[in-house]
Image (spheres, rainbow, N blue to C red):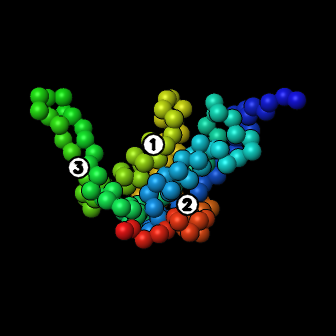
Amino acid sequence: MKTYTAKPADIEKKWILVDAEGVILGRLASIIAMRLRGKHKPTFTPSMDMGDNVIVINADKVQLTGRKREKPHYWHTGHPGGIKSITQGQILDGAHPERVVTKAVKRMLPSGPLSRQVMTNLRVYAGSEHPHEAQQPEVLDVKSMNKKNTREAY
């Protein structure tokens, strides 16, 4: 018995549309990361970009449970005393709320050159409009996959 290894000509990419409204962030990110990587396909090959192109809409309406809206993100400017922080709630309420979803998905992928290539297949939009109608994306209903995906934030 031989192990199957996909060739670049064998890879078939689809376009997937995901509505993030009311969905828990971590559960959404893990599903998107699996789709981007291609692990849902029986022909999965770890060294190839097998995944689908994923479009996420309504990223500003994603749910965070517990006190995760108050969780700070730190970075350093490189200057003495230059530590900065911002909370996830401030990011979601700010000008670029799609960055919360993008970062969550990026952190669920293994780091390396393949991960950076896979991340180019992700498109996240804060509103319900997206410019990819010509690709005729299939709708992936994350809400109906599991009842825990949409529980209320407490």
Query: Where is 59 relative to 3, above or below?
Result: below
Label 2 sits on residue: 17
Direction from residue 12 to residue 73 in the image, left or right: left
Q: For this rendering, which residue is in front, 82 or 126?
A: 82
Q: CA distance from mark 2 to mark 1?
A: 18 Å
Describe the element under mark 3 as helix, strand or loop. Answer: strand
Q: How many marks?
A: 3
Q: Residues within 10 Å of mark 1 (few under 14, many from 20)?
A: many
Say what amino acid the circle numbered 2 marks.
Answer: Leu
Image position, residue 153 (x, y; %): 39, 68
Say what amino acid the circle numbered 1 marks.
Answer: Lys
Residue 10 image label: none
Q: CA distance from mark 2 to mark 3?
A: 29 Å
Image position, residue 85 (x, y; %): 21, 45
Q: Residues within 10 Å of mark 3 (few under 14, many from 20)?
A: few
Q: Residue lying furthest right in this view?
A: 1
Q: Residue at x 63, y 30 (%)?
A: 47
Q: For this rendering, which residue is in front, 95 or 25?
A: 25
Picture quarter with the N terminus: top right
Q: Residue at x 23, y 49 (%)?
A: 86
Direction from residue 133 to residue 96 in the image, left or right: left
| Labels 2, 3: front one | 3
Residue 106 image label: 1
